């Protein structure tokens, strides 16, 4: 029954179309209406109580007037007896005073009767008024006769006229007093009953108002909380789409689920408007998400192509480096091959001698084996340098990388008359790197230094390794032609080169710069035009290595 009453109240009010402020104004209006009813009830009770109190006061006042009236008539009677029969001549003033008070008291009695519309009292007062006037006249006449010493006529007038009129007046007082006390008691009892009724009504009205306000607040709160909870659940659903815990459920349509949750909200208040906007936002996010997924797929494809292209560029740069040092490699390989050929010829001649010198033949064969190992080492290093594959970052001795790099570079530097100076620091900690890529960077730097020394006289390249500021550094310094600030500003840009057409691709320095960025390191240049250049490779140390070496 309570639920049906609530639904009836809410349907009759139709609060769905009200704004939030107007929704909350309903309990206030109900409270104000209830307060008005209570105030009206209090006003009615107060007016009734005031009327009853005035009535009791006026009835009591009438009783007092009648009591005084009787006392005045009795006083006049006693004074006349003393005057006429006992010859007390000093009672005239008392008689006259009491006689003159009768008329005003009757007037006051009549006014109270008219005030409360006491018809009986007013009729009695009007009937007794001539008797009171006659009583006044008789009393004055008796006093006059007594003053003239006419005692007998005074006594007769008292006996046959005054007593008759006095009896009438006393009967009036008695009839008027009859029932006044009962009337006062009845009115008092009625007032108490009115108090009980008022307090009962007050309590009932208060309870009804409290229940109505509670029902309104409960339903309004439900109308507000339910849509908010729907918004919260829809938000949680959308967040669940992007959470790591739901990676296995990415195919579920979270956006449709969130929209379905919000369909139950049909209010037209601010929360209803917010829900409508939220559904529009979900649709926008859904579309943006689908567009983002499509864009990510395209980006992943483009990134894969870019990585493949980058790998091809790095491989091309390696082959270009090998091509640039090919003359030196040919000379480097020709030397062991020539030595092998000569040793083989000498060994064959020794074998044709009548007396075979086994020791000499053994030495020649050992020389052949050494030269083969030398050539094999060069070829093996060339294979490692030019291979493709995954890049692995391993703890590596940077001085070993430098030594390995010059297996392919030494001969080309000798052929160009360049003096190589190694200044490698000892006890350097291992650094995490892909040693083949670092060797590629070093090969590119040394090859560029060689080309910068092409027109020089005392040609020198200094390669030094050292530890500095939480990093292991390699300097490749030459005393060649150097670079201007304008050239240095572009030296790492792709396809920028200062070499003649056909001698450079313009990718070597750009690829080297990218390799160092991939290692979390730096490739810096410091050059003075006409004096030479210094390229610095900087590879960061791990935190453990920094603490161990106190760099």
Image (spheres, rainbow, N blue to C red):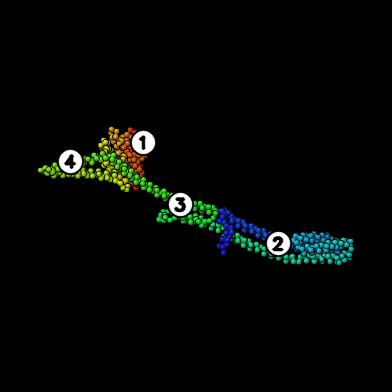
Name the mark on residue 261: none
Which residue was labeled with disc 1? 487
Quadrant in the picture for residue 3: bottom right
At mark 4, the secondary structure is helix
Q: Name which of mark 3 and mark 1 comes first in the sequence.
A: 3
Residue placed furthest toward the left: 354
The residue positioned 36% from the left and 46% from the top of the image is 305
Quarter occupied by the C terminus: top left
The alpha-carbon separation of the residues under discs 3 and 1 comes to 50 Å
At mark 1, the secondary structure is helix
The residue positioned 47% from the left and 54% from the top of the image is 235
Which residue was labeled with disc 3? 286
Q: Nearer the viewer, mark 2 or mark 4?
A: 4
Packing grade of label 2 (10 A; few <14, some 14-19, many >=20) is some
Describe residue 37's horizontal placement relative to residue 458 as left or right.
right
Which x, y percent locates residue 269?
A: 55, 53
Question: Can residue 394 be seen here?
Answer: no
Question: Can residue 180 be seen here?
Answer: yes
Packing grade of label 3 (10 A; few <14, some 14-19, many >=20) is some
Which residue was labeled with disc 4? 342
The alpha-carbon separation of the residues under discs 1 and 2 comes to 115 Å
Packing grade of label 1 (10 A; few <14, some 14-19, many >=20) is some
Quadrant in the picture for residue 530: top left
Q: Nearer the viewer, mark 3 or mark 4?
A: 3
Name the mark on residue 52: 2
The alpha-carbon separation of the residues under discs 4 and 1 comes to 50 Å
Q: Name which of mark 4 and mark 1 comes first in the sequence.
A: 4
Quadrant in the picture for residue 386: top left
Q: Nearer the viewer, mark 3 or mark 1?
A: 3
Which x, y percent locates residue 460?
A: 28, 36
């Amino acid at each position: 029954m309570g639920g049906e009453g609530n639904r009836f109240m809410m349907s009759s009010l139709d609060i769905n179309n009200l704004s939030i402020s107007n929704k909350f104004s309903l309990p206030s209006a109900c409270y104000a209406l209830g307060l008005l009813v209570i105030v009206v009830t209090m006003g009615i009770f107060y007016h009734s109580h005031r009327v009853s109190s005035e009535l009791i006061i006026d009835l009591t006042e009438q009783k007092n007037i009648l009591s005084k009236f009787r006392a005045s008539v009795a006083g006049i009677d006693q004074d006349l007896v003393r005057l006429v029969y006992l010859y007390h001549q000093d009672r005239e003033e008392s008689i006259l005073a009491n006689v003159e008070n009768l008329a005003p008291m009757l007037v006051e009695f009549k006014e109270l009767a008219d005030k409360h519309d006491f018809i009986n009292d007013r009729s009695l007062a009007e009937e007794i008024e001539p008797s009171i006037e006659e009583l006044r006249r008789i009393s004055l006449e008796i006093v006059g006769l007594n003053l003239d010493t006419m005692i007998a006529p005074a006594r007769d007038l008292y006996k046959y006229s005054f007593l008759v009129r006095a009896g009438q007046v006393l009967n009036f007082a008695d009839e008027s007093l009859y029932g006044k006390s009962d009337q006062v008691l009845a009115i008092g009892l009625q007032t108490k009953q009115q108090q009980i009724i008022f307090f009962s009504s007050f309590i009932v009205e208060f309870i009804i108002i409290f229940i109505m306000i509670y029902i309104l607040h409960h339903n309004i709160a439900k109308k507000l909380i339910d849509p908010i909870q729907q918004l919260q659940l829809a938000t949680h659903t959308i967040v669940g789409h992007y959470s790591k815990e739901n990676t296995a459920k990415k195919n579920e349509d979270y956006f449709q689920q969130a929209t379905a949750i919000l369909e139950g909200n049909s209010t037209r208040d601010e929360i209803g408007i917010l829900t409508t906007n939220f559904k529009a936002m979900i649709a926008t996010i859904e579309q943006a998400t689908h567009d983002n997924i499509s864009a990510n797929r395209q980006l992943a494809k483009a990134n894969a192509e870019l990585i493949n292209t980058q790998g091809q560029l790095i491989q091309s740069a390696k082959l270009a480096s090998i091509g640039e040092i090919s003359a030196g490699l040919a000379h480097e390989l020709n030397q062991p091959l020539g030595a092998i050929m000569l040793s083989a010829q000498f060994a064959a001649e020794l074998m044709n001698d009548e007396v075979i010198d086994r020791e000499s033949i053994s030495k020649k064969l050992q020389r052949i084996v050494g030269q083969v190992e030398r050539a094999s080492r060069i070829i093996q290093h060339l294979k490692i340098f030019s291979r493709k594959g995954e890049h692995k970052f391993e703890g590596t001795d940077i001085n070993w990388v430098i030594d390995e790099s010059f297996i392919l570079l030494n001969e080309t530097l000798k052929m160009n008359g360049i003096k190589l100076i190694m200044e490698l620091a000892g006890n350097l900690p291992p650094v995490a790197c892909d040693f083949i890529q670092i060797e590629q960077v070093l090969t590119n730097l040394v090859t560029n230094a060689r080309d910068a020394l092409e027109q020089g006289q005392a040609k020198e390249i200094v390669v030094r390794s050292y530890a500095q500021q939480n990093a292991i550094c390699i300097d490749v310094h030459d005393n060649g032609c150097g670079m201007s600030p304008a050239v240095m500003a572009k030296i790492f840009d792709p396809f920028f080169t200062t070499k003649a057409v056909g001698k450079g691709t313009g990718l070597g320095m750009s690829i080297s710069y990218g390799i160092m960025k991939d290692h979390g390191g730096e490739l810096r240049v410091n050059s003075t035009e006409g004096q030479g250049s210094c390229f610095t490779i900087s590879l960061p140390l791990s935190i453990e290595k920094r603490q161990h070496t106190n760099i």
